[in-house]
């Protein structure tokens, strides 16, 4: 089963509530607020942005005593503090506004050409079932463009991000 990653923009007060209140997370996820759905190709997007790092939530990596770089692009889709809301990958996570503001300009500096050059055979195992590189390329470029724009808008608004997999 292919799962999708959703990013939901939340104001700092709601974000703080989400860290301790499962209902607040559910309300944020089900609201008609600003969000993007990165579809089932998000693992490949993550691997391309991190130069080969497999998708694993940061809190899981830390629990397993694996190396986690708080300044790497691993944080874009797999970072954040776990919330009490369970999802398909463990728990929904919250990225604070300061983290979003730190990564938004760095993400904007990645050119589309540089991003596309990262598509190699190693990415194939992270694509949805039945996909090949030819089918994935335009989808991943579109998802990358959406991610850059969404991070930029979220940073400008001073909001945080709620990340959840369903």
Image: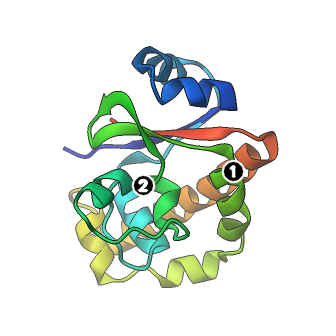
The residue labelled by disc 2 is 78
Quadrant of the rendering where the N terminus is positioned: top left
| C-alpha distance separating marks 2 and 1 | 16 Å
Q: Nearer the viewer, residue 54 or 70?
A: 70
Q: Which label lies toward us, 2 or 1?
A: 1
Q: In this view, does 73 lie above or below 37?
A: below
Residue 14 can be seen, yes or no: yes
Q: Is residue 139 above or below residue 134?
A: above
Q: In this view, does 152 lie above or below 52?
A: above
Residue 165 can be seen, yes or no: no
Residue 84: give x, y in percent of width and height. Answer: 36, 28
Quadrant of the rendering where the C terminus is positioned: top left
The residue labelled by disc 1 is 98
Q: Nearer the viewer, residue 148 or 97?
A: 97
Q: Is residue 24 above or below residue 150?
A: above
Q: Do the residues labelled 2 and 1 touch (CB within 8 Å)?
A: no
For residue 41, which quarter of the picture? bottom left
Helix, strand or loop status at disc 2: helix
Left or right of residue 15: residue 136: left
The residue shown at (52%, 58%) is 76
Residue 22: give x, y in percent of width and height. Answer: 40, 20
Helix, strand or loop status at disc 1: helix
Q: Which of 42 and 10 is in front in this view?
A: 10
Q: Which of marks 2 and 1 is nearer the N terminus?
A: 2
Residue 150: give x, y in percent of width and height. Answer: 66, 48
């Amino acid at each position: 089963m292919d799962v999708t990653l959703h990013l939901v923009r939340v104001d700092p007060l709601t974000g703080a509530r989400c860290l301790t209140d499962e209902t607040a997370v559910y309300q944020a996820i089900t609201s008609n607020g600003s969000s993007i759905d990165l579809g089932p190709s998000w693992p490949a997007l993550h691997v391309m942005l991190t130069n080969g790092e497999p998708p694993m939530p940061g809190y899981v990596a830390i629990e397993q005593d694996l190396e986690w770089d708080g300044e790497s692009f691993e944080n874009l889709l797999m970072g954040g503090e776990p919330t009490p809301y369970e999802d398909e990958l463990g728990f929904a996570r919250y990225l604070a506004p300061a983290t979003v503001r730190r990564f938004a300009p760095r993400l904007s500096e990645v050119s589309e050409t540089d991003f596309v050059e990262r598509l190699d055979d190693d990415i194939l195992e992270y694509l949805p079932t039945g996909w090949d590189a030819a089918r994935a390329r335009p989808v991943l470029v579109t998802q990358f463009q959406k991610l850059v724009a969404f991070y930029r808008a979220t940073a400008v608004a001073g909001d945080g991000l709620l990340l959840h997999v369903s």
